[in-house]
Image (cartoon, grey):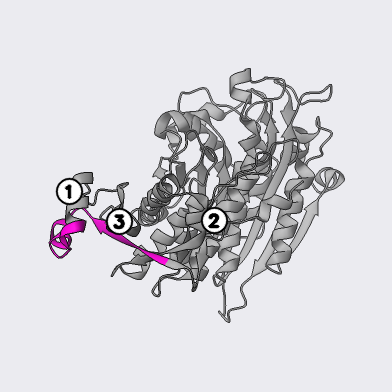
Amino acid sequence: MTEHIFNFPAPFAKSSKKTVIPVYFISASDFPKWIKKQNKSLIAQAYQANFIGQAKQALSIVDAKAAPIKILAGIKDPAYYLDSASVVQHIQNSYGKDFINDHVFEIISDHEEDILNKICLGWGMAAYKFDVYKKNDKAFPTLLWPAKALPKEVTAKLEAVSLLRNLVNTPAADLGTDELADVAKDLAKKHKAKVKIFDDGDLKKKNFPMIYAVGKASPRRPQLVDLKWKSNTKKSKPAKVTIVGKGVVYDTGGLNLKPGQYMRDMKKDMGGAAHALAVAHMIMALNLPIELRVLLPIAENAVAGNSYRPGDILNSRKGITVEICDTDAEGRLIVADALTYACEEKPDLLVDFCTLTGAARVAVGYDIPAFFSNDDDILDDLRHSSVIVDDPVWPFPLWDGYDSNLNGSISDIKNEGTGRAGHIEAALFLQRFIDKKTDWIHLDCYAWQNSDIPGRPQGGADTGARAIFDFIRKRYG
């Protein structure tokens, strides 16, 4: 039941014969000058509603018959991509289904291309709804594409975020290991990419022991997706970019069973794989001039008589032996085998997305992924990209002083450190499996929105995908 995964909102039109309502996006700094040029009725209505151009403000201006003739919308300076989502909420709260369906909306603005793209992206984000199990027939306002916007880019990003959200929101009963792999195959087909699946038997035969060990207790068998795509641009030597995404379709914690309140939302533990596929979609849809590879280690961390145990020692693809201290630290195990495999092809850049540690959430909360890199320039450039596209990430150090916390007494390494900085120790664990000459980024993200806000409904959420895409495009595009 994955037909809905590729259902994307499309709340835009190039033209329309319907009645057009203009929407004016105005910042608080521009508002005093702008309002002086307006008629007395508009000035009075803005004054009565205390509209001053603040972000999240929206006001319908009506004529003498109380019919709406334009909408004023506050916008941050610089603009924020969800400013327009608040306008959508205002329209839906103010007008009925028939009115919304009989009108279209048009941005009246002298903003530049990048601002218009943000406004359109936020409008599209607000159109997202996950109504597979509970129908949502609420009408959604259609926006006319602004002349200076880039529909192809906005659409690619909107589709990528919707793909990510749909994957994370789908219950684990309907999105198992086979289904997640099938989504990757469908995406590959859409973009004429090649895909190879290492199934249950392949994982043992071809040396992916930790992916197999984590997933062996589930009837839904572990596997590894290997997707490859190359741009059709005529760049002589395109950069090789590999993206790894943690794909634990459900995480019980294994024999170190999670308490119920922490297990409730563990369908989202494949959020790393969802982010990887979202970034891949943006790269392929916008034809970045690179060679792309996506690796998805996929497993269900279940409980059975053959579950791997605390105290077990696992071999890894790299030959490093790993003592299991906690079976709930399973994500780093499957990702480690995939990272080793990725480095064998010597990529120019290796990125992994993981819903890995609660320690990262303690450090930076739910909205901001902690990220790590073995290259100082990447730390600065990625954070800058995240600010530009309103997709914040925050750098943390690969602190050598904590590395010895992972050393085992009867194994090379343990899957859990002895210190308090669990997100740093998890990153240091993964670093043991990285070729030192490979530029690497590790994102420890949450992939979930705890509460509804306009444009970001409760449930699956993009946390870092757009930032990584922007970084890759600036570096190689």
Lower position in the chain sequence, tag 2 or tag 1? 1
For the residue carrying disc 2, how many other residues have a C-alpha within 10 Å: few (<14), some (14-19), or many (20+)? some
Which one is nearer the viewer's eye here, 110 or 298? 110
| Amino acid type at mark 1 | Tyr
Q: Position of residue 422 (x, y in %)?
A: 50, 29
Lower position in the chain sequence, tag 2 or tag 3? 3
User: What residue span does the magenta drawing correspond to?
Assistant: 20-41
Instruction: Tell me, for residue 438, which label it has, or none.
Output: 2
Q: Position of residue 26 (x, y in %)?
A: 25, 58
For the residue carrying disc 1, how many other residues have a C-alpha within 10 Å: few (<14), some (14-19), or many (20+)? few
Q: Position of residue 458 (x, y in %)?
A: 52, 37
Outermost residue, top side: 259
| Amino acid type at mark 3 | Val
Q: Nearer the viewer, mark 1 or mark 3?
A: 3
- Asked whether residue 33 is drawn in magenta, I would say yes
The part of the image, by quadrant, that contains residue 333 is top right
Q: Which residue is mark 3?
A: 62
Q: Which residue is mark 1?
A: 47
Q: Judging from the image, what secondary structure is the residue with disc 3 in?
A: strand
| Amino acid type at mark 2 | Thr
Q: Determine the residue positioned at 69% across, 26% down.
A: 252
- The CA distance from mark 1 to mark 3 is 14 Å
